[in-house]
Amino acid sequence: MTTDSSAPRRDRVVLAMWGMVALILVAVVAGMVLLWPDESPSSIGPESRLPDTERARVVDTDRVECQVPSSSQCLEVTVKLLTGPDSGDESSFIAGDADDESAPTKGDVLRVVKSDVPEGSQIGGVEVPAYSISDYERRMPLYWLVGLFVVVVLVTGRLHGARALLGLAGSLAVVVWFLVPALVQGEHPLVVATVAALAVMLLTIPLAHGIGTITIAATLGTSAALFLTLALAVLFTDLAHLTGHSGDEVAYLQAYLGNLSVQGLMLAGVVIGALGVLDDVTVSQSSIVLALRRARPDRSTGWLIRESLVVGRDHITATVNTLVLAYAGASLPILLVFAIGDMSAGDAFNGESVAAQVVATLVGSIGLIAAMPITTLIAAILATRLDDDALAHASAHAHTH
């Protein structure tokens, strides 16, 4: 982590802002200590564990009559096990409709799961195969995509890109080692998500931008907008009577984690989803303020705020559009179901699946819009308290990022 030399002159306002950042840090550390999970997800119970899968390559396919009466033929695939205790053996099973365009073909690599019943057993007169298909093997193309992403970030961003990747790794660590285990353990999702979001913010912003004017303004602006988003999400989730019961995953979680607040989990998703765009806006807006202050150091704080907001509005418009389209894309299958069912627009809008996405989109957008003036005000107050040398260093540091 770097420390830029743009630290503002230590007047009371600046010290108060540093104090607020310190309070956020202390609160996050205390929250993580209190909520830190003391057991892993696998220790919840064997009944909640999903079966392990093995790699298998399709060596042959055949169209056969379905054992259950059907108007179409079924596809029987023969696979060679590549991993597991039966590695090297072959197994055959039905893999769905033979005319399905997504059906496996020879050479495909699958993930298969071993049956719990003894081989050769029958259920309802139908023989149970030793293995059945679980999914396609997708890890290798995903590894290649991750590698391509890392290369693009490093080539484009260089040192800043490397820091961004470290921040991303830290964010994933917070999610994997704190957020998910704490939720499984039964902690309230909203509290855990808020602590996790603030922890990610405190990790990624200083790591990418050092400790100085940009970090102070972006941290305080992001925190304020995040709490506003949280308050609006809680309010409108309650007003709209959203329960969070809108997916098979929720039913599975409730079956094995009876103490889980489903509504809290939905709100937690809003908080985590909003953070990604919030820090982008706050960091960019802080950099804009510094650049304008360096270009016109003779201008007042009011002028700096007005001009920064003019520049920031274009960024906000594009970012809000991105956020809305992202949620719309995620809801597309649901919208198609409503269209096929010939449901009226009013009923579709009223349905929980759509209403939850509307609430998440709009409260996230409001928090995003609010982040711009809040961050601009904080950054302008800090920037006008920089002397010429500190301002030059601050702007240079901002441009390197």
Image (cartoon, rainbow, N blue to C red):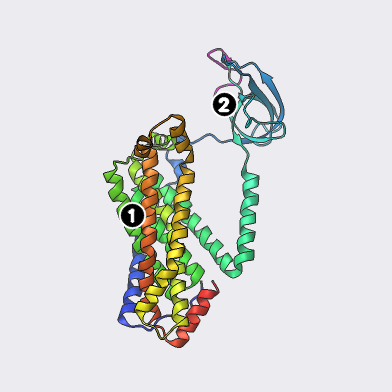
Work out whether residue 185 can be spotted.
no
Q: Label for residue 259?
A: none
Q: Compared with residue 110, is residue 284 higher up or lower down, i.e. above or below? A: below
**Amino acid beneath label 2:** Ser
The magenta stretch spans which residues? Answer: 117-126
Q: Is residue 171 left or right of residue 135?
A: left
Q: Residues within 10 Å of mark 1 (few under 14, many from 20)?
A: many
Q: Compared with residue 58, is residue 276 higher up or lower down, i.e. above or below? A: below
Mark 1 or mark 2, which is nearer the start of the sequence? 2
Q: Nearer the viewer, mark 2 or mark 1?
A: 1
Q: Is residue 121 magenta?
A: yes
Q: Quadrant of the C terminus?
A: bottom right
Q: Is residue 46 left or right of residue 157?
A: left
Q: Where is residue 225 drawn, in percent x and y? A: 36, 61
Q: Quadrant of residue 18?
A: bottom left
**Amino acid beneath label 1:** Leu
Q: Residues within 10 Å of mark 2 (few under 14, many from 20)?
A: few
Residue at mark 1: 230
Residue that appears at 44% across and 51% down: 324
Residue at mark 2: 115
Distance between the alpha carbons at the discs numbered 2 and 1: 45 Å
